[in-house]
């Protein structure tokens, strides 16, 4: 964060004050000597961001595909060495710049791949747990409390958050959480992804790249995200506010009648209305 002297105008007039502003940097990612993308991002957890971005873009298979990640904080450059033959030069012409804050980017090859994936049913979570997890996500960011300038993303099970990340871009926050999970060898098959931001088709693409069965958002989905979630059997829960939520796909993974307490929220979903 950086602080600035500003003038605040209210109904009572003009007041001079100090204001905290979130930091933004351009991170250029180079893989095996080839420049792949430049991401506008928050300056923390950059190795996690690089790992998550490469994985959700379909450019690496797993954490073992990466030999080294070196971050140059003077030039804001990430140098990645992989165990593979490298990334084909044709990908330079197949980038898709997305709707995300922080200028999200995915690759058309990875989008082609995820459209063929259909996730199996099985893992489920209680509705009361979703409410508790979202409350933890939305109140857990010191950076957001200070600046209001970042999104949050987390990976969780039904009992609590495993990984929590902030970034100016919702795509980046998701990639940071995914990258940390890859480095920690955490599987995704019984995982919930929580995000404070809008769920668009490229966010769903990241979910599918990880085979995450449930995504939960405080924001709204787009129509293409809903269609893709229904086609691929991803449970999409959005507009989680207070004790309410909208389930756009995969209702079978949401338990609504189990009376147990989760982080201070007790009872089934009927008790929460």
Image (cartoon, rainbow, N blue to C red):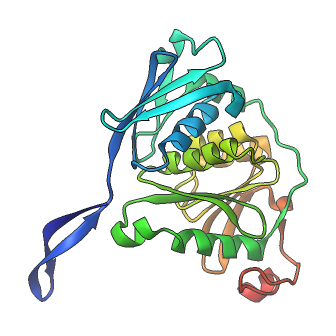
Left or right side of 93 for 17: left
Q: Which residue is drawn at 81% across and 61% down?
A: 251
Left or right side of 232 for 68: left
Q: Is residue 155 above or below residue 18?
A: above
Q: In which quarter of the image is residue 14?
A: bottom left
Q: Foreground: 107 or 232? A: 107
Residue 88: % across, % down:
56, 11
Looking at the figure, which quarter contains the C terminus? bottom right
Q: Which residue is drawn at 68% across and 42% down?
A: 182
Looking at the figure, which quarter contains the N terminus? bottom left
Left or right side of 161 for 98: left
Left or right side of 114 for 70: left
Can residue 200 be seen at all in this image of the molecule? no
Q: Which residue is drawn at 66% across and 18% down?
A: 83
Q: Foreground: 125 or 17? A: 17
Residue 244: % across, % down:
66, 76
């Amino acid at each position: 964060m950086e602080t600035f002297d500003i003038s605040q105008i209210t109904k009572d007039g003009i007041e001079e004050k100090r204001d905290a502003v979130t930091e933004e940097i351009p991170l250029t990612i180079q893989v095996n000597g080839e420049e792949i993308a430049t991401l506008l991002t928050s300056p923390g957890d950059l190795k996690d961001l690089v790992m998550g971005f490469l994985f959700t873009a379909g450019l690496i298979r797993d954490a073992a595909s990466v030999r080294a990640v070196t971050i140059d904080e003077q030039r804001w450059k990430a140098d990645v060495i992989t165990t593979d033959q490298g990334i084909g030069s044709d990908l330079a012409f197949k980038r898709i710049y997305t709707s995300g804050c922080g200028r999200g980017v995915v690759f058309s090859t990875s989008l082609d791949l995820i459209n063929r994936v259909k996730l199996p049913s099985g893992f489920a979570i209680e509705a009361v747990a979703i409410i508790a997890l979202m409350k933890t996500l939305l109140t857990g960011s010191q950076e957001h409390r200070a600046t209001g300038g970042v999104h949050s993303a987390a990976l969780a099970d039904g009992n609590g958050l495993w990984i929590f990340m902030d970034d100016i871009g919702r795509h980046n926050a998701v990639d940071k959480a995914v990258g940390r999970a890859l480095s920690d060898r955490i599987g995704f098959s019984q995982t919930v992804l929580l995000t404070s931001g809008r769920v668009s088709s490229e966010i769903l693409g990241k979910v599918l790249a990880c085979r995450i069965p449930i995504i939960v958002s405080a924001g709204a989905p787009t129509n293409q995200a809903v269609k893709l979630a229904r086609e691929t059997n991803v449970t999409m829960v959005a507009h989680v506010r207070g004790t309410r939520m909208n389930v756009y796909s995969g209702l079978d993974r949401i338990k609504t009648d189990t009376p147990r307490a989760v982080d201070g929220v007790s009872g089934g979903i009927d008790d929460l209305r």
